[in-house]
Amino acid sequence: MLARESVPYLLVTAVWGILFYILLPVLAILPAAAFLFILFFFRNPARRVVQNEAHVLSPADGRVQAIEAIDHEDTFIRGRAVKISIFLSIFNVHFNRSPINGKITYTAYRPGKHLPAFKSHASGLNEKNTAGIENSRIRVLVHQITGFLARRVVFYPRRGDYLEQGQVFGLIKFGSCTEIIVPANVKVLVREGQKVTAGITVIGVLKDD
């Protein structure tokens, strides 16, 4: 499966490839390489998601960059929480998936800079899209954060839409960071430096379960 957002990039590289081939065939190697990279970057592999109401699944592929206990009283969760930051390299699948079954009851967008996503202060300065998802048992926040190469956040649903656990809800183009904020009653199962897979890796479980 391939993201529809890849089509303009594929068309441009294909046209350049044809023009370069007409002028000097050896030059066509460059747009051909770009064409293949775009196919690779915008891939959306099928995932066998095992849904569980007590589990919080990873919203992104990548590596856990930081795990931090925070107070989150100003917007959605309102209380003690844990923020898990996941860094995505250009080689990771960049589709975001819902960590829980639930309704989108909060959304926010903030324009900003495009600092490298692995920088600790990038979350507070870079362009960011936020989705709050909740069900009868839990609320979670997911931040899609752009990076140095990532210049656009894509978010498909709208506030009020219902997401299945593991359902694709968006993507970030060309290297980025995804953060998930869970309430303190979630026992975090991942560690810093661990690789995670969207819709597959269980990053936390409700403690009362």
Image (cartoon, rainbow, N blue to C red):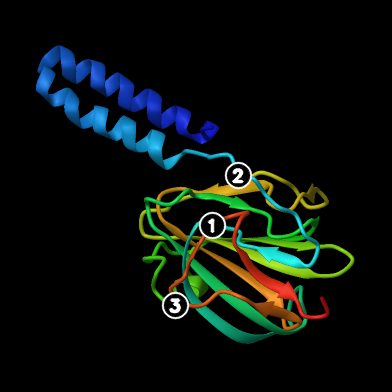
Sequence-wise, which precedes: disc 1 or disc 3? 3
What residue is at 38 percent from the left and 57 percent from the top? Answer: 89
Which residue of the protein is positioned furthest toward the top in this rendering?
A: 22
Q: Amino acid at mark 1?
A: Thr
Sequence-wise, which precedes: disc 1 or disc 2? 2
Residue receiving disc 1? 197
Q: At which x and y percent is residue 39?
A: 40, 33
Please say whether residue 154 is visible from this viewpoint: no
Would residue 176 appear left or right of 1 to someone viewing this image? left
What residue is at 24 percent from the left and 29 percent from the top? Answer: 31
Q: Quadrant of the C terminus?
A: bottom right
Q: Secondary structure at mark 1?
A: loop
Q: At which x and y percent is residue 51?
A: 75, 54
Give how far apart the Cα atoms at labels 1 and 2 are. Answer: 10 Å
What residue is at 51 percent from the left and 33 percent from the top? Answer: 2
> Is residue 185 or residue 116 the one in the foreground?
185
Would residue 97 appear left or right of 123 to someone viewing this image? right
Q: Quadrant of the N terminus?
A: top right
- Badge 3: residue crowd in 10 Å (few <14, some 14–19, many ≥20): few
Residue receiving disc 2? 47
Please tell me in which quadrant of the rendered image residue 40 appears. top left
Residue receiving disc 3? 121
Note whether 2 is above or below 57 in the view shown.
above
